Every structure is written in structure tokens, then in C-alpha cells.
Amino acid sequence: MSDKIPNVDFAIIGGSGTLSSDFPKNFADVEILADNIFFDTPYGRSPAFRLCSVDGKNFLTCKMHGWRSGVTRADSSRQIFWTFREAGVKRILSEGGVGTVNRLLNPRDLLVPDDYLDLSTRKDVQLDGRYLLIMRDALCPELRGNLLMSAKKFFTGRIFERGIYAVTDGRHFESPAEISMLKGHADIVGQSLVPEVYLAREIGACYANLSFAVNYGEGIQVWSHDTMKEIFFDDAHMLGNILLDTVKNTFAAERTCDCLNLRKETLLKEIYNPN
Ligand SMILES: [Zn+2]
């Protein structure tokens, strides 16, 4: 049976950065209002969501971008964003570990990307095609600014205020030749920003991402799986705190960004809305 979709303004899509912390259980000021809730969507049953509250501010969250075996990543994303649209979500934060492409970056550098490069081959990543999506400022400048303010409170390492996130399909990492090709075009590489940026724009929500470097791109430096494992377990709580602080500081503010104006009713109505 499908649970009732709550009305919420805010959502957090958990990734590899917060997974080991069972986010947001055991975080200060957080109350879990409903756990393990599922919704029937046109794209199949949703992943498990949690309805949570931090300082009285409600948000929905799910783990690992909704990825799970037996469900394509495109469908996982559509299940999540269909649910967000029904819930009335207006702001979305996501996080995840990434590999480095820019030679100046190291594992444990934190980035809030300001643009992306889509090298994925995922298809069917829209909900209904009603809108033309203009991908200028796909990562909301306002929400990114708030995320950066919170990051500076909880993280003492290097924080980069911009960067280009190249998106590949995975699940494998990239070859040295692929990393070499990306140099000069992207700073980090990961697998989750697409299709989330498209779907966020389609539902009219602001979207920002917190990326934590967990390994060197292949061919840049030899990296160790042990380091990645340490980051995975040691830094999850810090990343969760950044996300929660951003919710607290952003929740009540009016949106003054352009995100909602960067989707336009499609001119191809006879194709997408024949009636
Ligand atoms: Zn925005």
C-alpha cells in the first residue's frame, strides 16, 4: 500500500557521503517523523523515504539517490522526483563522493559544483516533457551560496566554491584515457548529478550538490581504497551536518533565484501534449 505523500518544501537526496551515518538519525535537533515510507509512482514503487524535521523544519530524504538492484537508475530518479513534485518540494540538496579530474584536487576536498557536463547515456529521464528546460545555472546560485556558508562552519579543509562535474554512467570508475579526455573540461567526475539536475528543473525546484572528493581520477595519482573507506566512515557525520544546517538557514527564505523561470512551456505541444 502506498503511503500518503506529505507536503514538504525541502528534500535531501543522500549519496555515498552520508550513507554510513544512517542520515539523519542520531543528528542533533532531528526528529524522524515517519520512517520507511514508500509511494506508488507511474515509474514503479519509490525507494524508502524518511520524513524528518530539523529544528521544526520538515524535509524528505532517501538514501543513495534511490539506487537499488532491479531498478534502473533512470527509474529510481523519476520515482524520487515524481514524489517530490507531488509533495510540492521547492528546494533539493544532494551529495555524493566524486573522483578528481583537476590535477590540483585531492581526496577530502569539498566542492559545490556550479556546472556539469553530461556524458551519461541514460534515457527516459523526464517526467512528462511539458517543459523546455534551459540549463543555465542548473545548480541554483542561491542554494549553492547557502550550502557554502554551512560548509564553512563544519569543514576545516579545502572548499571550492565552483567546479564542473562530469557525469558518467558507472557503476565502474573511469579509465585513464577517459580522465585524460576530461581534463580541461571538468574538475570532478561522478555518476549522480544527471538526471537529477534535469528533473529538478522540470519540477521547478532549486537544486544544489555537495561533492566530496574520495579518490584521484585514474592516471592522476595512485589512490588507495583504504583512504576511500576511511572517508566513507569518518566524514559522513560532517557532511550530514552541512546539509542539515543548510536546511535550517534556507527554509524560510523566499526564493529570489531564476530557477523557476528557466523552464518554459514547450512549443512542441502536439508531440508531448497531444490533447
Ligand atoms: Zn534556485
Image (cartoon, rainbow, N blue to C red):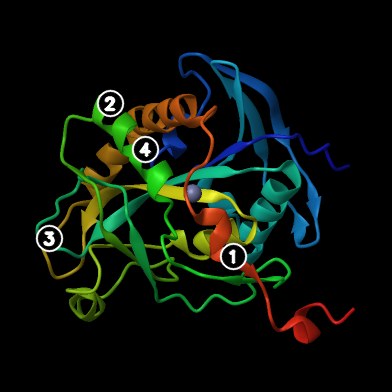
| Secondary element at image label 3 | loop
Disc number for residue 222: 3
Would you name the residue on which mark 4 appears?
147
Marks 3, 2: nearer the viewer: 2
Q: Name above or below for residue 226 compared with residue 243.
A: below
Lower position in the chain sequence, tag 4 or tag 2 = 4
Marks 4, 1: nearer the viewer: 1
Position of the N terminus by quadrant: top right
Q: Residues within 10 Å of mark 4 (few under 14, many from 20)?
A: many
Dividing the picture into quarters, in which one does residue 38 lie?
A: top right
* Residue 268 coordinates in the image, percent (x, y): 71, 84
Contact between marks 1 and 3 (CB within 8 A): the answer is no
In this orientation, which residue lies closer to the viewer: 103 or 267? 267
Disc 4 to disc 2, how far (Cα)? 11 Å
At x 51%, y 31%, the residue is: 253
In this orientation, which residue lies closer to the viewer: 23 or 135? 135
